Image (cartoon, rainbow, N blue to C red):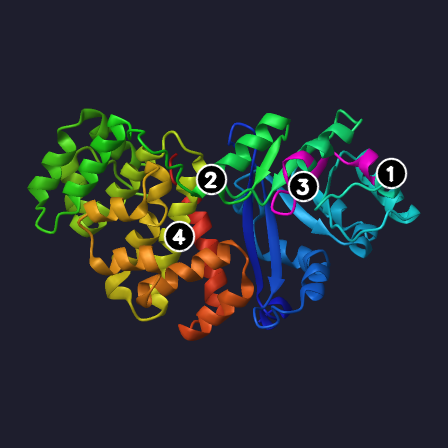
């Protein structure tokens, strides 16, 4: 066993960062070693930007974690001075300076060195004071906490900046209204969970193509749906048939021989697996007007829940765990209340209860992945203990789920 394997496992969560068009610009990566010392924030910050950062990338594939986009990595002052950033390619990371870094001469010199080599610098949790001007002059990106600021203050940050090259990033953006406000006043990037929430507008109709896809989803999950019936449901829509066959023949399946018909797919996969994969494809179509990250997040949850089901002795119900994770964000796909959508879907009451209330074995696993996504490590620790899951398994499931979701043909 290696030294790294003997040490506490390194946990990593990621938070997406979008551009103005809701395309992924990068991910902030959040690290910690082990779960039980969650109360020591100081240790976490030192850890997140220390030798362990390098150890992390002996264990993780950076491109896999970020889907080939930039990784925002938090740096404390001491680690910035250690030249750790030079271990990474200039276009693979953003060096994010934590808010407690002081603009001392050695810090300024280290930043100038990184800038001269082509690295991108970001200032975290920015609050303007004149003494930070030397760092501001070197920054490419400035992050503003939308949870801790209000409209006029958010605007003033941009107006006070005389450096036209600086781009502002709104973090902790929780609603579409905050996103729209930030976009209107000139913010270039956005970080937060607004993308995974429904935009429910009273009186607005759901597009007809989404209603048609939802109808297919409902028919497919009828408990008495036979192989012949499933084939009929898919075949009546030529474009759906084409997309399904293209999907099944993609890298996500890794099949040796090409599948040429719906009947062939059903015989190869069986009805349970077929419904699972068909649900993914339909959800992808429902999200055609949404950020890709919404589908990636749903797939990651689904796979994580499925893998965790096997770990906690629920292998016989792994398809239920998968569908629970997959449908856990369906309200954001349809921009309708979750209760209304689940009332129409003929899925088990256990799945519905888990998605709505996060109760029972199913709901507890969903709560686990949601809190892991948000790097709420104290809650992750509590849930993992209640489920009697080794913390190393949680990390393995999360990373394997990301890798699996990345293969999905969006």
Q: Quadrant of the C terminus?
A: top left
- Residue 196 shows in this picture: yes
Q: Is residue 239 above or below residue 44?
A: above
Q: Nearer the viewer, mark 4 or mark 1?
A: 1
Q: Which residue, given by chain and number where applicable, does mark 4 sit on?
A: 301
Q: Residue at x 8, y 50 (%)?
A: 224
Across and down, in percent, residue 124 comes to 71, 45
Task: Please tell me how crowded label 2 is: few (under 14), some (14-19), or many (20+) other residues with Cα within 10 Å.
Answer: many
Q: Which residue, given by chain and number where applicable, does mark 3 sit on?
A: 144
Which type of secondary structure does the marked residue at label 4 adopt? helix
Q: Nearer the viewer, mark 4 or mark 3?
A: 3
Q: Residue at x 82, y 56 (%)?
A: 78
Q: CA distance from mark 4 to mark 3?
A: 29 Å
Q: CA distance from mark 1 to mark 2?
A: 34 Å
Which type of secondary structure does the marked residue at label 3 adopt? strand
Q: Residue at x 35, y 37 (%)?
A: 335
Q: Which residue, given by chain and number where applicable, does mark 1 sit on?
A: 134
Which disc number belongs to residue 195?
A: 2
Q: Residue at x 68, y 41 (%)?
A: 143
Across and down, in percent, residue 222 comes to 13, 47
Q: Nearer the viewer, mark 4 or mark 2?
A: 2
Span colored in magenta: 134-152
Which type of secondary structure does the marked residue at label 1 adopt? helix
Q: Is residue 235 above or below residue 380?
A: above
Q: CA distance from mark 3 to mark 1?
A: 18 Å
The reply to whether the magenta stretch includes residue 135 is yes
Which type of secondary structure does the marked residue at label 2 adopt? helix
Return the disc, 4 or 3, that comes first in the chain's sequence. 3
Would you say the residues marked 3 and 1 are in contact, meaning their CB atoms lie under 8 Å apart? Answer: no
Return the disc, 3 or 1, that comes first in the chain's sequence. 1
The reply to whether the magenta stretch includes residue 156 is no
Across and down, in percent, residue 268 comes to 19, 46
């Amino acid at each position: 066993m290696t030294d790294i394997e003997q040490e506490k496992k390194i946990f990593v969560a990621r938070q997406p960062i979008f551009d103005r068009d809701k395309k992924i610009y990068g991910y902030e990566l959040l690290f910690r070693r082990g779960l039980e010392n969650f109360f020591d924030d100081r240790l976490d910050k030192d850890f997140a930007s220390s030798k362990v950062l390098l150890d992390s990338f002996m264990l993780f594939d950076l491109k896999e974690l970020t889907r080939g986009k930039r990784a925002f990595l938090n740096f404390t002052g001491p680690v910035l001075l250690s030249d750790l950033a030079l271990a990474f390619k200039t276009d693979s990371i953003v060096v994010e300076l934590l808010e407690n870094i002081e603009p001392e001469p050695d810090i300024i010199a280290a930043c100038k060195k990184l800038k001269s080599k082509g690295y991108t610098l970001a200032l975290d949790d920015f609050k303007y004071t004149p003494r930070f001007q030397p760092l501001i002059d070197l920054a490419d990106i400035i992050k503003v906490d939308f949870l801790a600021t209000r409209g006029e203050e958010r605007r003033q940050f941009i107006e006070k900046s005389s450096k036209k090259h600086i781009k502002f990033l709104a973090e902790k953006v929780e609603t579409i209204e905050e996103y729209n406000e930030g976009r209107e006043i000139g913010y270039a990037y956005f970080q937060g969970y607004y993308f995974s929430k429904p935009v429910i507008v009273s009186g607005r109709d759901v597009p007809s193509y989404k209603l048609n896809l939802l109808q297919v989803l409902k028919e497919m999950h009828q408990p008495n749906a036979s192989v012949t019936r499933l084939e009929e449901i898919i075949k009546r829509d030529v474009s759906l048939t084409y997309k399904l066959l293209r999907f099944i023949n993609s890298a996500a399946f890794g099949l040796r021989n090409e599948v040429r018909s719906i009947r062939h797919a059903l015989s190869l996969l069986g009805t349970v697996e077929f419904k699972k994969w068909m649900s993914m494809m339909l959800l992808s179509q429902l999200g055609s007007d949404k950020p890709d990250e919404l589908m990636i997040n749903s797939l990651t949850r689904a796979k994580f829940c499925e893998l965790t089901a096997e770990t906690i002795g629920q292998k016989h119900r792994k398809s239920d765990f998968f569908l629970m994770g997959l449908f856990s964000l369906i309200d954001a796909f349809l921009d309708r209340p979750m209760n209304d959508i689940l009332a129409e879907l003929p899925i088990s009451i256990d799945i519905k209860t888990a998605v709505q209330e996060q109760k029972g074995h199913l709901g507890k696993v969903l709560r686990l992945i949601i809190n892991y996504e948000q790097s709420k490590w104290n809650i992750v620790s509590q849930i993992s203990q209640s489920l009697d899951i080794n913390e190393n398994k949680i990390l393995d499931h999360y990373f394997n789920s990301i890798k699996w979701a990345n293969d999905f043909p969006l």
